[in-house]
Image: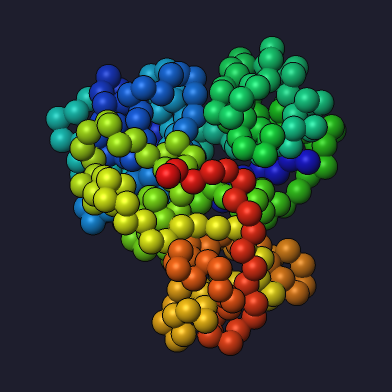
Amino acid sequence: MFTELSTTALIAARGADAAAFLHSQVTSDIASLEAPGTQYSGYCSPKGRLLATFLVWKLGDTILLQLPRALRESVQTRLAKYVLRAKVALTDASAEYRLFGVSREAGERTLLPFVSVLPQKPHEVSAGASLYVTRLPLERYLVLASTADATALHAALVAGAREAPPETWSRLDIEAAIPEITPPTQEQFTPQMVNLDAIGGVSYTKGCYPGQEVVARTHYLGRIKQRMHPVRIAAPLAAPGDSLFSDVFGEQASGTLVSAVGDNDTECRALAVVQRAAADSALHWSTPDGPAVTLLPLPYDLPE
């Protein structure tokens, strides 16, 4: 299986201070990330609430922030306000590259002509002449190819794998419990609420960035009262930002959907931030007596 991620955008940071600038803005440790490599990260408001989540590509002198296309302009504009005298240029690089999500089986059949070896561990990157391949959780690959040279790659994928819609990749992200902030959920969650700290997207030793004091205080005081879980909802039309309710909190919402994708005509899969006090109770979507919500196991351990 493969899918082209057509709703994804890229912000490029280039220049002598690119790594140092982004290190001072996002939640992850950009300075320690070796190139080529990827990592998850987030961008917070001063109140410690997420404005965006990223997959960061560090490719030598270029660093790419991968995020939903709907957020690219606003996030790039906000970051640009803090460049000041730093030697870094921020540009929309979406037209420079094409992104393809590829299953492990399809990748082994189609990608080896383009790279000498496929990455073996999550976030390792293998470089080819005109593309990069990183490995993501759930044994799948993400391919970043220059637009000028992506035609041959796309032809190889079409010849050797089944093409799937972008929703298929979104479903895998939900299964892997990888959060994606979108316009309906901006400024609703701290990084820990969406488990960004559990997937390598938060550093508590790197120094200051917007919202750092709130994020660090939440960590060191142990006040993480909400966590993200994969869920199954007995309704097909749930959407990011929708509320969940529980017997514990009554008519007060006890959770919020981060992302959702239809599974069939009667249910959907989603990621939901849920009050820990309500996690073991009966959960409902949209209203206190709405369709049932079932919490599913996380594919990784949460920090103590």
Q: Quadrant of residue 291?
A: bottom right
In the depicted view, which residue is nearer to us: 227 or 127?
A: 227
User: Is residue 241 at least partly visible in the picture?
Assistant: no
Residue at the top extreme? 116
Above or below residue 45? Residue 9 is above
Quadrant for the N terminus, please.
top right
Give how far across and how far down residue 218 sits, in percent. Answer: 29, 52
Q: Which residue shows up at 49% across the image and 40% down it? A: 199
* Residue 282 left/right relative to 9: right
Work out which quarter of the rendered image holds the C terminus and state it. Answer: top left
Q: Is residue 93 left or right of residue 83?
A: right
Which residue is drawn at the image coordinates 53% and 63% (left, top)? 272
Q: Position of residue 301 (x, y in %)?
A: 54, 43
Q: Residue at horizontal 71%, vertical 28%? A: 153
Q: Is residue 131 above or below residue 154?
A: above
**Visible in this render: residue 280?**
yes
Residue 41 percent location from the top left of the image: 41, 40
Colour scheme: rainbow
Q: Can you name the residue that lies furthest to the left here?
A: 85
Image quadrant of residue 92?
top left
Residue nearer the viewer, 4 or 45: 45
How many discs appear? Answer: 0
Q: Between residue 220 and residue 76, name the one nearer to us.
A: 220
In the rendered image, the vertical position of residue 183 relative to residue 107, given as above or below: below
Q: Left or right: where does residue 73 sit relative to residue 24?
A: right
The answer to which of 265 and 246 lies nearer the viewer is 246
Question: Vertically, is 3 above or below 64?
Answer: below
Q: Which residue shows up at 59% across the image and 76% down it? A: 282
Residue 292 at what x, y percent from top left? Answer: 65, 77
